[in-house]
Image (spheres, helix red, strand yellow):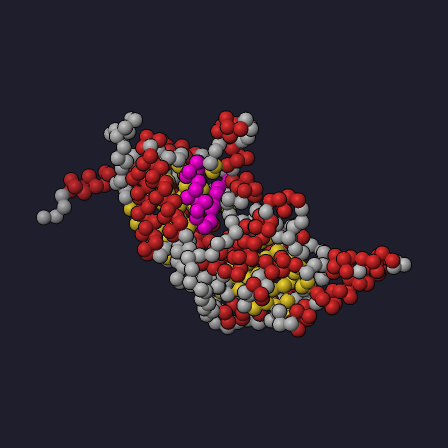
Amino acid sequence: MPISPTLLSNLEQKRRTAYAAGGEDKLAERRKMGLLTARERLAVLFQENTFMEWGLHAQHDCHDFGMEGKSMPGDGVITGVGYVDGRPVAAFSQDFTVGGGALGRIHSKKICDLMDYAQKSGIPLIGINDSGGARIQEGDDSLSGYGQVFFRNVELSGLVPQISVIAGPCAGGAAYSPALSDFLIMTQKNASMFICGPEVIKAATGQSTTMEEVGGAAAHATVSGNVHFLAENDTHALQIARKLLSFLPSNNVVDPPHSPTPLVDMSPDPELNQLVPEDPKAPFDVHDVIGRLVDEGDFLEVHRDFAKNLVVGFGRVQGVVAGFVANNPAQKAGALDIDASDKGARFIRFCNVFNIPIVTLVDVPGFLPGVAQERGGIIRHGAKMLFAYAASTVPKLTFIMRKAYGGAYLAMCSRDMGADIVYAWPSAEIAVMGAEGAVKILFKREISTASDPKAREKELAAEYREKFASPYEAAAKAMITDIIEPAQTRGVLAMALRNTLSKRETRPPKKHGNIPL
């Protein structure tokens, strides 16, 4: 006997109820605010008609504090799997119109079930966060639910990419799940993320502040460094997520989505010869160099507004995906400081676990000097860069554009730190310190007693630079692979990437290294 029309009608009615979420009035109110609904966000993320929902009919199981008999469609979160550019991706979208998107036991179970599936299937996970936090009515069940989500965030780390979108409030313990993911995207309006809000801070410390100062997108992108991408609105945030996925493998045992061109184009790019000043003290923006190296200038910068003296991000070089780490002399002369070291180390480690080759562009005068840096732990933070590069087993290609001084030369992936191939431009200087500083120490007395101290200092600096800092000196000692003119860089890089993609390197067995956190 076929299924009766009554049963089919009942099913359709329950679906409509679930799709209505917290009610048409609440959905309309959100749209007036310029916000997408939880379902609309998933529709922007996924290819049309590919989303397979899990737990549409789920409901809370709390019977206290006014929750008895209260309907909460989906228990405030939509979960499922869909396709992004032909690849399956798991995603959840919290629904603020249903109980403020608060997390309870069933809400948590839906997310955890999805995370378990993502792990078993080896597919990326995207979480769209828009929640008032823990569901107070469920007490310790809510805390337990967060703990189970956090545990799975850590289990998935290094197995599949995890991307968090902050599209609404993300308060208290709820902020730690995004913090445990690989990348955070936050909308500039209508979104906040904080552990303690202004009222709590005022009560506890007496300090007055605003939500924008402690939980706003700009503060997280520029000061705290918690957020990797700023988005104009919901749609833009999900477009960034799609763009990011286009550079990433689905999991840690497959290669990134390379699309190598049939033949390597070794044609020179004369424009590169003009971009970088020969004077090591003259500033330039390394974005201009990266734009000439990647295909059609298509570079997705990560952490763009944080620690601008170091640039990191993804691009393709003649179809091969690569992660770029580059000093930016236009900011703090390209020196490494505490924030830049943290930013670089995290990005390097992400590239390593997901098989993405690392391209390093070097123009670094050293670690940033200063009392605040020393007392803030620049030794510990700088060591993260050393640790991250040395621990990485993916292809590592380094290009020394100009200065590479002292410990920062090593921290930017020298041959001694595991670089597979190191190229230098003729303008490169590799030394313990800059020539001017070196001669002031080595020839202090001679300079002070000279008839023209400034002229003698300049003369000695030129001699030091030629004898000790020349790239040909480093090449003679086999510290670099070759010296090339800047115009050759894109072709040489493309060939080097092709030649190292088959790299396989094993390390002594251990649980994990102990990075200086």
Q: Residue at x 60, y 44 (%)?
A: 376
Q: Is residue 94 left or right of residue 323?
A: left
Depth check: give the residue in front, 446 or 81.
446
Residue 500 appears at what percent x and percent y?
Answer: 50, 69
Q: Is residue 477 magenta?
A: no
Q: Is residue 475 left or right of residue 302?
A: right
Q: Residue at x 29, y 26 (%)?
A: 66
Q: Give the magenta-colored segment's residue range.
A: 169-188
The mark tally for this picture is 0
| Quarter-of-image position of residue 372 | top right
Say whether residue 118 is visible. yes
Q: Residue at x 41, y 44 (%)?
A: 177
Q: Is residue 176 magenta?
A: yes
Residue 413 appears at what percent x and percent y?
Answer: 57, 61
| Quarter-of-image position of residue 491 | bottom right
Q: Is residue 208 left or right of residue 129?
A: right
Depicted 38 relative to depicted 512: above or below: above
Depicted 427 relative to depicted 134: above or below: below
Q: Residue at x 74, y 68 (%)?
A: 467
Residue 126 appears at what percent x and percent y?
Answer: 40, 48
| Quarter-of-image position of residue 234 | top left
Say whether residue 21 is visible. no
Residue 454 appears at what percent x and percent y?
Answer: 84, 57
